[in-house]
Image (cartoon, helix red, strand yellow):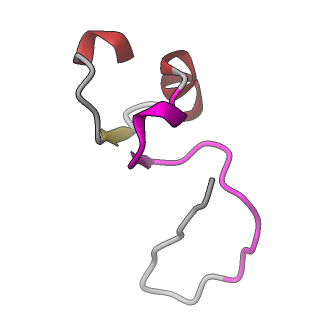
Amino acid sequence: MSFLRVDREKILLKCGIKHPNEMIYLDDSLIDAREVKSLLKPGGKTLINTHRPLSEFK
C-alpha cells in the first residue's frame, strides 16, 4: 500500500491516511470489496482498474 497527499501548501504530515477522500486501485486482486466502502470518507470516490462488475463493490 502507498499513499500520496496533494495540496497547494507544504504538507508536513508523514503518516498514513486512514480515511481518504479518494482511492485508486491499480490491481483489483488487492481489493476487499467490503473494505472499499469502510475506508473512504462519506462522499469519497474510488477508481478501480478491474474487469469485475461494479455490483461487487456496492
Visible residue check, residue 35: yes
Q: Is residue 29 magenta?
A: yes
Residue 57, image quadrant: top left
Q: Residue 30 at what x, y percent from top left?
A: 53, 36
Q: Looking at this view, is 45 or 35 the one in front?
A: 35
Q: In x, y percent, where is residue 43? A: 37, 33
Q: Magenta residues: mostly which secondary structure? A: loop
Q: How many marks?
A: 0
Quadrant of image for the C terminus: top left
Q: Can the viewer see residue 58? A: no
Residue 35 vertical placement versus 48 (above, below)? above
Based on the picture, tell me whether residue 39 belongs to the magenta stretch: no
- Does residue 48 appear to the left or right of 37 in the view shown? left
Q: Residue at x 51, y 30 (%)?
A: 31
Q: Residue furthest bottom?
A: 10
26 or 13, nearer to the observer: 26
The magenta segment is 12-31
Residue visible at 42% across and 85% down in the picture: 8
- The x and y percentages for residue 7 are 45, 78
Residue 51 place in picture, x, y as percent: 23, 28
Q: Which residue corresponds to the image point at 70% horizontal and 83% vertical from the top-left? A: 12
**As drawn, 12 above or below 46:** below
For residue 43, side relative to residue 13 (left or right): left
Please indicate whether residue 2 sits to the left or right of residue 29 in the image: right
